[in-house]
Image (cartoon, helix red, strand yellow):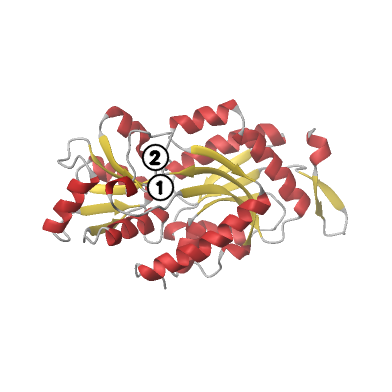
Amino acid sequence: MFFLLLGFCVSAHGQETPFPQKGNIEITVLFPAGSSADITARVLAEGMGRQLGVNVLVVNRPGAGGAVGYKYVASQKPDGYSLVWNSNSISTTYHSGQLASDYRAFNAVARVLVESPLLAVRGDAKWKTLGEFIADAKARPGKISVANSGTGSHTHISSVALFKAAAVEVSDIPYGAGQVVPNLLGSHVDATVQLPGALASHIKSGAVRALAALIPRRDPALPEVPTAREQGVDVSLEAWRGIAVPKGTPVGVIAVLEYAIRRTVESPEFVRGSEKYAVRPAFLPAAEFGELIAAEDADLARLMQLIGLKK
């Protein structure tokens, strides 16, 4: 089956060469090792490697809410060997002024999964519900500290949108993604808006309590966590992750990568890994994924303008 789906690249001599032919495929992850983005990318890379018969390596290139990694991949040869583990951050980094090029610098390959941004506190915190948290924030404007994964990140936008909608003022603390949970557990911040891959094990152990999920309906991976909407705050900012390649990558190469991703996402191994990190497999093919990114980019631009984060 694999050989029937080979993609082709045009060489410097005008000859077509099969893809993947040799060498490693590299997935750039925009956040540090150990982050939820890193963990889920490694599960994907392992499965893609089995499907393609080559090594698929994860390389972490964190910084500027994802801008460092996006800039790197956009500058690479469009031959299918340099991929980016992209997310809603392609729009948030651009509209926050950290990235010069928007999503059109890339070709979409496939959406892989979706995640629920969570407002979470330590397990021993006094707040048991979103309502209690908001009431305290209203009583003490700017005194409650809420960490996120960095300026312009999806968790940053989600946090600002949540508290704008609730009409309360908190102290916004942008960390690097890998620093958020240790600082929460170490009592250096009061709360965080973070994705479940970084929080799931701590929620399960009781070290962290999730007060609200910022999605339209309860997440099947975290059915006990009520949504913000259920609790009277109309905010929904579901996060997604997928694969994109530099603009101009051949259609045949994209088709091979898309097929390998589909087979991986549908595999029992990937489903089990997703359950472990409380994310949901949500494959979309290249064309539909590209349409989603374009539509959401416009929505995020409007939201960021509304909450004062658009540059």
Give the image quarter of residue 140: bottom left
Look at the image and tell me in which quarter the N terminus lies. top right
Question: Given the current orientation, which residue lies at the most extreme bottom position?
Answer: 311
Look at the image and tell me in which quarter the C terminus lies. bottom left
Tag 1 residue:
215
* Numbered label attached to residue 147: none
Q: Position of residue 125 (x, y in %)?
A: 17, 40
Name the residue located 28 percent from the left edge and 47 percent from the top edge: 231
Name the residue located 76 percent from the left edge and 55 percent from the top edge: 250
Q: CA distance from mark 1 to mark 2?
A: 7 Å
Secondary structure under the numbered disc 1 in the rendered image? loop
Q: Nearer the viewer, residue 82 or 258?
A: 258
Q: Amino acid at mark 1?
A: Ile
Tag 2 residue:
218
Q: Is residue 98 visible?
A: no
User: Answer yes or no: do the residues labelled 1 and 2 have beta carbons within 8 Å?
Assistant: yes
Secondary structure under the numbered disc 2 in the rendered image? loop
Q: Is residue 267 visible?
A: yes
Relative to 19, say whether 1 is above or below: above
Give the image quarter of residue 13: bottom right
Q: Position of residue 172 (x, y in %)?
A: 26, 59
105 sits left or right of 157 in the view: right
41 sits left or right of 188 in the view: right
Q: Amino acid at mark 2?
A: Arg
Callout 2 environment at 10 Å: few (<14), some (14 to 19), or many (20+)? some
Q: Nearer the viewer, residue 63 or 233?
A: 233
Q: Position of residue 191 (x, y in %)?
A: 24, 47
Name the residue located 15 percent from the left edge and 61 percent from the top edge: 141
Q: Position of residue 196 (x, y in %)?
A: 39, 40
